[in-house]
Amino acid sequence: MADMRERPLSPHLQIYRPQITSVLSIGHRATGIVLSLGAALLVLWLTAAAAGPDWFDIAQRCAGSWPGYALLFVFSVCLVYHLLNGVRHLFWDAGLGFELETVSRTGWAVVAGTVLLTAAIWLLGLAVAEGP
Amino acid sequence: MTVERRGLGSSRTGTSHWWRQRLTAIALAPLTVFLVGLLPVLAAATHEEFVEIMRIPVTPVALVLLLAAGLYHMKLGLQVVIEDYVHGEPVKVGLRIALTLATCLLAAAGIVSVVMLAA
């Protein structure tokens, strides 16, 4: 790599002002990485259930603890965001929505949708979990 | 460090990787909605209730599909993350092997558990 030293480099990432497009782009990757951990824990939970009531109780108590709920909340935000932004990506793959104004508008829609849907999921979810 | 030039372009399987990432994404959209609906029901369940819900055929079918599509989607995504940020060839190959094996382990454990619970 010695011959690379004097070559011009493109401006480093910190030079740029954060924009809705770039922040959401790296956010898609970041939430994807977080969801990988969520997938592993989902499998662990299913494995605990298959292992029998004793293991399942331990898993349920972990999930129902404060840190468990905090982690579930983070996973839910990441899941909703990754899903909504993923749909945005699929539209781009179909060649739609590339105008700068549209890209920015759909980006903010994803942010708003994530907040609203996550809130709705938790309100409904807690109501279901607590029962009638 | 020298990187051997293989003359095969950036990747030999780029198109198929890209396509499978999208295909699994499309499959995961409805499956994710199912999971989000199922989780609050299962979260408060006792083991007995959990098994009861797992014995309704739609639950294990959707969960197996979710695990298969989701873990494959995860593997494809994390592979790109490794390729983007890890530059040493031995470490990169090692991580990619570990990723593939870990994905297979998660898929096997998850699917076998679902089948056991549903059986």
Image (spheres, coloured by chain):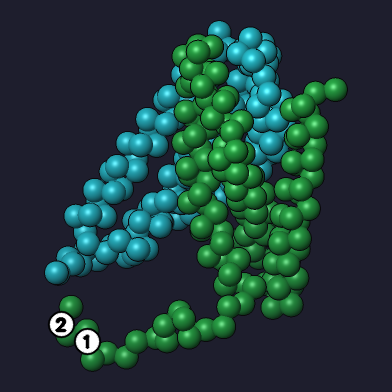
Residues A68 and B40: in front is A68
Distance from the alpha carbon under mark 2 to that under mark 1: 6 Å
Task: Tell me, yes or no, if residue A97 can be seen here.
Answer: no
How crowded pointer 2 is (Cα within 10 Å; few <14, some 14-19, many 20+) is rated as few
Q: Quadrant of the N terminus of chain A?
A: bottom left
Q: Which mark is residue A2?
A: 2
Q: Is residue B14 above or below residue A63?
A: below
For badge 1, the amino acid type reads Arg
The chain identifier of the residue carrying mark 2 reads A
Classify residue A68 by image quadrant. Answer: top right
Q: Is residue A35 left or right of residue A19?
A: left
| Contact (Cβ within 8 Å) of mark 2 with mark 1 | yes
Q: Which residue is mark 1?
A: A5
The shade of chain B is cyan
In depth, the one of A54 and A84 nearer the eye is: A54
Q: What is the display colour for chain A?
A: green
